[in-house]
Structure formats: C-alpha cells, structure tokens
Image (spheres, rainbow, N blue to C red):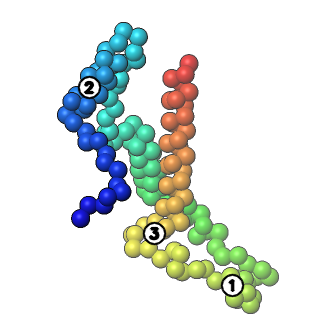
C-alpha cells in the first residue's frame, strides 16, 4: 500500500540526460573554454622508481660493501670495560648484549637494525634526488 503523504518525485527521462550532455559538450567546445585533459593512472611513477632504486642501492651497498668492515671494526673494539673487566662481569646485569635484536638468518648477519638504517638512508638519498630534480625544473 502506497503512502498517501509521500511526494511524487519527477523521473529522469532520456531527454533530460541528453540535454545535459549537449550542454556540457557545448561548454567544452566554446572558444574561451579551458581544454579538458584526461588523467590516467600508471602502475609505476617516476617517484616510485627513484625511491625504490635508491632503497635497493643503499641496501645492497650496506649488505655487501659496508657490513663486513663495520662488523670488523665493532669486533676489534670489543665490549665496554671498567677496571679491566667487562661491565657485565663487574655486576651490571643490563650490560649484556640483547641477542634477540641481533638474531638473523642472514649468512652475513644483516639484522633488522641494519635494514632500517640502510632503508632510511636510501629514502633520504631518494628524496634528495627528487628535490634536486624538482629544483632543476624550476630554473
């Protein structure tokens, strides 16, 4: 049963749709109108390629070039000592190295800390490259 107090809304007809399309086409083809440009989405933009490339380069340099020398220098330094014995042996129970942070399945020992550090360096280098490219386009 229909509600008696409900207003009747006008139905859109095919003619009103056609007239709106004709009006919009007339506005676009007007001599003083700004041309409409269609934008398309791409899977990979230049920004994504630059940032990803810089990240990959920084991670590869960190893993294969700098990691062995960093590990060698920290191994030569050794643990902190006081009065000839390590901090842990002197009674500081919190001076023991956290093994869970440095546990990894990587053969060279590339940890999550190394990954975050080299990834942030890659992002910084990528954004610097994009900023200089943007600055050069302004000149």
- Total number of numbered labels? 3
Q: Pointer 1 and pointer 2: residues touching (CB < 8 Å)?
A: no
Determine the residue positioned at 31% across, 39% down: 42
Q: Position of residue 43 (x, y in %)?
A: 30, 43
Counting residues from the N terminus, which is met first, the one under dot 1 or under dot 3?
Answer: 1
Determine the residue positioned at 34% across, 55% down: 6
Determine the residue positioned at 36% across, 9% down: 31
Q: Quadrant of residue 97?
A: bottom right
Q: Is residue 15 above or below residue 8?
A: above
Give the side of residue 74 with respect to residue 137, left or right: right
Q: Assess disc 1: are there few (<14), some (14-19) or many (≥20) residues with their C-alpha within 10 Å of its C-alpha.
A: few
Q: Assess disc 3: are there few (<14), some (14-19) or many (≥20) residues with their C-alpha within 10 Å of its C-alpha.
A: some
Counting residues from the N terminus, which is met first, the one under dot 2 or under dot 3?
Answer: 2
Distance (Cα) linking label 2 and label 3: 70 Å
Residue extending furthest right? 83
Q: Position of residue 41 (x, y in %)?
A: 32, 39
Residue on which the image places disc 1 = 94
Picture disc at residue 109: 3
In front of the other: label 1 or label 2? 2
Determine the residue positioned at 49% across, 67% down: 112
Distance (Cα) linking label 1 and label 3: 23 Å
Give the side of residue 71 with respect to residue 22, left or right: right
Q: Quadrant of residue 98?
A: bottom right
Q: Quadrant of the C terminus?
A: top right
**Residue 31 in view:** yes
Residue extending furthest front? 4
Residue on which the image places disc 2 = 19
Q: Position of residue 70 (x, y in %)?
A: 55, 61
Distance (Cα) linking label 1 and label 2: 79 Å
């Amino acid at each position: 049963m229909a509600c008696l107090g409900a207003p009747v809304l006008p139905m859109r007809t095919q003619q009103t749709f056609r007239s709106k399309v004709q009006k919009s086409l007339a506005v676009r083809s007007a001599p003083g109108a700004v041309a409409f440009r269609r934008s398309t989405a791409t899977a990979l933009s230049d920004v994504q390629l630059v940032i990803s490339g810089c990240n990959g380069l920084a991670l590869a340099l960190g893993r294969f070039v700098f990691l062995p020398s960093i590990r060698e220098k920290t191994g030569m330094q050794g643990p902190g000592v006081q009065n000839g014995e390590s901090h842990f042996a002197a009674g500081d129970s919190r001076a023991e190295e956290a093994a869970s942070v440095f546990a990894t399945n990587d053969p060279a020992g590339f940890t999550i800390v190394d990954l975050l550090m080299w990834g942030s360096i890659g992002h910084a280098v990528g954004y610097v490259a994009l900023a200089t490219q943007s600055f050069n386009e302004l000149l």
